[in-house]
Amino acid sequence: MAFLKSLGGILEPVSRDVRDVTAAAGILRVPEFEVFHLAFAHWHGRKASDAQLEPLFVNYLFREQAPPWVRHFTRAVIDDERQGQLDPTKFGLPARPAPTVRSMNFDLVSQLILAAAWVAVLLFAFLDVV
């Protein structure tokens, strides 16, 4: 469990499986367990129940090992993203709407507000120390 290792102060490198599953989850904007669901359906052509996937997911959490079909799936997601050809429908997800100018402006404004808040926090922390 890479998360617990980092919390305990032990900085051990995580396995490639963990890096790939978390990267694919981030790219697809789904939880890691959902990556297992999507990968199973993509590989086997049918859906799996939570009960079927739980032992495999627990093994992934504790041993940092994913089944081969999860590896194949995550690497395909990562490769498509790197090539700028990510199509969520190819991986069993609904199509994403194209970003609008308004949503892009909102993202920029929210990032600027967040940056200003961090500057204020750091400034107050510095002034409090001095």
Image (tube, rainbow, N blue to C red):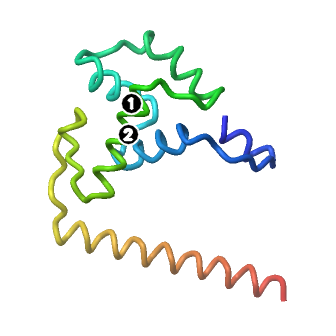
Residue 94: quarter of image: top left
Which x, y percent locates residue 67? 47, 24
Point 19% across, 70% down: residue: 102
- CA gap, disc 1 and disc 2: 6 Å
Horizontally, is 78 left or right of 86 in the view? Answer: right
Q: Is residue 129 above or below residue 101?
A: below
Would you name the residue on which mark 2 appears? 30
Q: Is residue 20 above or below residue 129?
A: above
Point 71% across, 39% down: residue: 4
Element type where label 2 sits in the image: loop
Q: Are marks 1 and 2 in contact (CB under 8 Å)?
A: yes
- The amino acid type found where label 1 is placed reads Glu
- The amino acid type found where label 2 is placed reads Val
Which x, y percent locates residue 127? 76, 87
Q: Nearer the viewer, residue 31 or 1?
A: 1
Point 70% across, 82% down: residue: 124
Crowding around mark 2 (Cα neighbors within 10 Å: few <14, some 14 to 19, many 20+) is some
Would you name the residue on which mark 1 appears? 34
Crowding around mark 1 (Cα neighbors within 10 Å: few <14, some 14 to 19, many 20+) is some
Element type where label 1 sits in the image: helix
Q: Is residue 31 above or below residue 101?
A: above
